[in-house]
Amino acid sequence: MDSHCHLLFSRFKMGCGNIDSDFDVKYGIDAIVQRAVDANVRYLLAIGTDLADVSEMQEIVDRHENVFRTVGIHPLEADAHYQRYSFQEISQTIRHNCNQPKTVGIGEIGLDYHYGQENERQQKAIFHQQLDLARECSLPVSIHSRKASKDVIDILGEHYGVCGVIHCFSGEKDFARCALEMGFYISISGVVTYRNAAELRDTLKFIPLDRLLIETDAPFLAPHPFRGKINEPSLLVYTASKISEILELPLNKINKCSSQNFFQLFFKR
């Protein structure tokens, strides 16, 4: 179960270097989904980042029985969305799409200060807005937090009771502890396979097995030995195997628990 991936061509092209002549064939949606199934990654959650993509995302999940989606605005898209849409239009679009078939969450939402905090006000405003919609629609959220863990926890604390997952968790134990206390799940990406991810591997042992999810964040963050290449859901098996090794648990137990957790979180309603 890939709990967080991006399937639109634009995201895949952002995540790769040189584009081969057969790129559109090799990385077409149907081919990606089939390779995942062949690798025993049976279900995919395609994550929304931009309201301009909602129709294409719906077409993808309509075409593939094993693909579900979220709808939401990535924090780095906050400025563009407030310039393009009114506050009411954002709410109406998200609310409408939350009622569409196979929409199981709101995300990815959160805060990203990696490039600075010049648009902190807009990021926080749209984060609050989407958390309010998550409560209204009774949907879990997929949280993006990059160099912003304190502010993310503070804001989630203001919306206590909204459940969800910390996507692509980076390894901060205090952040994990606070999120777990709020009822959140923690999702581990291919970063756990990198040599410089000692903190993440250490904190992984602290995460209860019934709160663990696994993701690719495809097309980004391909696991070792594919680091630096295009990631895709079929490569989830490498991350799951590393988690199995770190926790000293059978791989089938890791796969079973993470899949159960996914359905427990995203299919409550």
Image (tube, grey):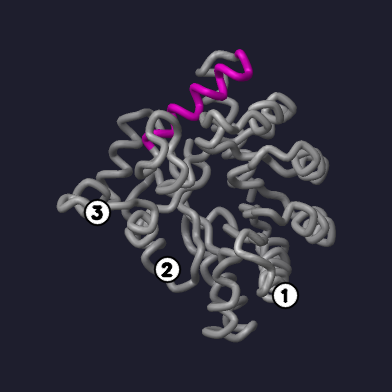
Looking at the rendering, which quadrant does residue 148 occupy? bottom right
Say which amino acid is labelled 1.
Arg
What is the number of the mark on residue 53? 2
Count of numbered circles on the image: 3
Pick whichever, 53 or 16, lies toward us. Answer: 16
Residue 57, horizontal then vertical, whole percent: 40, 61
Residue 62 image position (x, y, % from top left): 36, 56
Which residue is at a point 44% across and 27% down the rendered structure image?
238
Which mark sits nearer the N-terminus, 2 or 1? Answer: 2
- Above or below 95: residue 218: above
Assess whether mark 3 and mark 1 are in contact (beta carbons under 8 angstroms). Answer: no
Q: CA distance from mark 2 to mark 1?
A: 24 Å
* Alpha-carbon span between mark 1 and mark 3: 36 Å
Q: Nearer the viewer, mark 3 or mark 2?
A: 3
- Kindly identify which residue carries mark 3: 19
Q: In percent of the image, x 80 and y 40: which residue is there?
A: 174
Q: Of discs 1 and 3, which sits in the foreground?
A: 3
Amino acid beneath label 3 = Ile
**Residue 150 sits in quarter:** bottom right
Q: Are marks 3 and 2 in contact (CB under 8 Å)?
A: no
Mark 3, secondary structure of its residue? loop
146 to 115, vertically: above or below: above
Q: Nearer the viewer, mark 2 or mark 1?
A: 1
Label 3 – label 2 distance at C-alpha: 22 Å
Q: Residues in magenta?
A: 234-248
Q: Which residue is mark 1?
A: 121
Report if residue 240 lies within the magenta region.
Answer: yes
Q: Main secondary structure of the magenta part?
A: helix
User: From the viewer's perspective, is 15 left or right of 93?
Assistant: left
